[in-house]
Structures are given as C-alpha cells and as structure tokens.
Amino acid sequence: MTKIAVLGDGSWGSVLGSMLQDNGNEVTLYGNNESVNQEINAHHTNSHYMKNWKVNPNTKATGDLEKALDGAELVVFVLPTKAIRSVSKNVHKVLAQTGATPLLVTATKGIEPGSKKLVSEILTEEIYPNNTDRIVAISGPSHAENVAQKDLTAIACASTNVDNAKKIQKLFSNDYVRFYTNDDLVGVEVGGAVKNVIAIAAGILVGKHYGDDAKAALMTRGLAEITRLGVNYFGAKPMTFSGLAGIGDLIVTCTSVNSRNWRAGKQIGEGKTLDYVLKNMGQVVEGATTVKAVHELAQEKNIDMPISEAVYRVLYKNTNVDEEIKEMMGRSPKPEIRL
C-alpha cells in the first residue's frame, strides 16, 4: 500500500484519487472548497463536479495541506495551471519541514503564461530544483466521466527517469485503465496542453455548423501545430505526438461533449462571449489560458501556428470567427509535411 496525496478534488482529481484507492492505496484528496471536502467525507460523493457517482468510501478529503502530505510517498497535482506555482511553493515549505522527498506526478494539462513553463518545469523550480527525475507526467485520452464509469482507457506516463515512470505505471494501472511509459516528458506535456487550444477551435467549428470534413482537417492540422511547437521550442520527440498524449488526447478532446474546452468553443462559435462562457462553465477551461502562452511561444520563436493564433485573436482580440476562417483558408500554399 502506497500513501498518496492528490492535490485537487475536482472531477479528475476525485476520480484519480478514488481509482488509486480502488487499486489498494491510501489516498487523501486536498482541496480548498470545504463544502466539497465535507461532502466527500460524509457522503462519498462530489456532486458539484461528478453527478451520480460515488467516491471510494475509504478516500478522505481535507483542506489542510500538511495533513494531506503527511507520510505521502507520492503527490499527484490535479490543479488548474494557474494554481500550480502557488501550491507548489506551499508544498515545498511542508516538505522542507519534514525532509520528505515524495515522487511528484502532474495530471495538469497547461502551460503557464508569462513564464511559458510546463507544469513539470514549475514543479522542478519550486520543489526539486534541477531534478526533473522526480517528476512524472500523465496524459492521454481520459475524461473523468469515462474513467469514473470504468470505460477502457489508455494513458501515457512520462519521466526523464524510466524507473519512476514504471512505478507510476504499476500504481495507476488496473483492469480498465492501462498506462504506457514514455521518456519524453516535455513532449507528453506539450501534447496534453496544446490540444486544449485545438479543442476550442473544434468546438467553434461545430458552433458554426461546419461538418465532418472541417473537423477532420482541423484536428490533422492542429496536430501539425502541436508537433511543430513541441519539437522546435521544447525539443520534444516528433513520434510522441503520434501517441496517446498527442493524437489520442487530441481526438477525444476535439470530439466529446465531456470536453469543457470543446463546449467553450462551441458556445463561442454560437456567438457567446468568452467572459460569459468562463463564468457559466462551472469548471476551468484550460485552453483559454494555455492559448496565451502558446501565442507568446509562437511569437518568440516565429513558429507557424495559424489555428492557435486565430483562437487567440478570437478570444482576446475580439476578431470575427468567420473572417478568421476565411483568412486561414486563403493563406498562401504550403507543403503538408514540415516542421
């Protein structure tokens, strides 16, 4: 039995925590919403995020970070990207007091605007300076709703240390979720983060009543953008984007109503404002934040990312969706395969 702290008791955090408890571990969920914590402890439900679903009754929830981390051999971050750095600083303070050195897992899919850092880079900076070996990223086509229903799911777990990736593979895998190891930590993270931007674009197309051809073209060219950014800016391996954290996650996020990024894009395509969508979604839309960082990265290295840049302009420059589509389709001819 491994003692695990899962930081973040939203939909994905609760489902992962419950699954890890099912796998025979001792899990404590950490979150700052006391009503959610109380509901999990008293009723073994999390109705705000996951309706008609039961958390493993042995899974505990707390708003006390020290209590959550006490004795933890593994700490799983399932927080919005914007909260990762501040919580990481607090985790570092607690661990410095105890001397503990747990393995860290990030299940967060985002890039921090401003710093343009991946989550593993933030965790390394704030908790384990100059030691990425202690970080594992998990990413792949995995909606919380489907995993909660024990749908068959495959996910990549990536680390610069293959032994640590194998540890996570063994701890997390069961008869309905299968984990595959990967040594391309940054590639897996880039795929998981940037597909949220493409998913917003996919939702916009549906909101504008475009059909299957348009959606297929968008996903294919979106994958090209993700690969281009991952390879040219972060030094990722191109083949990573043909795997679970690349095309796999892209497909599910661009086609499922369970994707909040897709749902956000669909509403924008239907004419709603970003402010309205974010206020009424009820959960974090990571792609709306990540697209800022992607814009900064593309500008810095002059990386060609027309879909991502169009999403950025629609969300933050209030440009017209129809005009953006017209301009994109009228771009000068390009070869299909290029980095």
Image (cartoon, grey):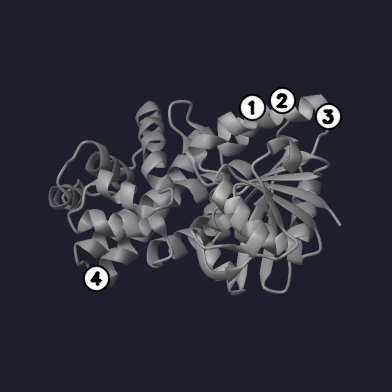
For label 1, the crowd category at 10 Å Cα-Cα, with few meaning under 14, some 14 to 19 and many 20 or more, is some
Q: Which residue is mark 2?
A: 93
The alpha-carbon separation of the residues under discs 3 and 4 comes to 56 Å
Does residue 218 appear to the left or right of 165 in the view shown?
Answer: left
Q: Are marks 1 and 2 in contact (CB under 8 Å)?
A: yes
Q: Which residue is mark 4?
A: 211
| Residue closest to the eye, 81 or 335 | 81
Examine the image and state in which quarter residue 155 appears: bottom right
Tag 3 secondary structure: helix
The alpha-carbon separation of the residues under discs 3 and 2 comes to 9 Å
Does residue 286 appear to the left or right of 106 in the view shown?
Answer: left
Q: Position of residue 151 (x, y in %)?
A: 59, 74
Examine the image and state in which quarter residue 263 appears: bottom left
**From the image, which quarter does the C terminus lie in?**
top left
Three-letter amino acid code of the residue under disc 4: Gly
Question: What residue is shown at x 35% (from left), y 35% (from top)?
Answer: 295
Tag 2 secondary structure: helix
In the image, which is nearer the foreground, mark 4 or mark 1? 1
In the image, which is nearer the foreground, mark 3 or mark 4? 3
Three-letter amino acid code of the residue under disc 2: Lys
The alpha-carbon separation of the residues under discs 2 and 4 comes to 51 Å
Q: Position of residue 105 (x, y in %)?
A: 68, 45
Q: Are marks 1 and 3 in contact (CB under 8 Å)?
A: no
Judge whether residue 16 can be spotted in this image.
Answer: no
Question: What residue is shown at x 64% (from left), y 27% (from top)?
Answer: 89
Q: Which residue is mark 1?
A: 89
**From the image, which quarter does the N terminus lie in?**
bottom right
Vertically, is 235 above or below 207?
A: above
Q: Which residue is mark 3?
A: 98
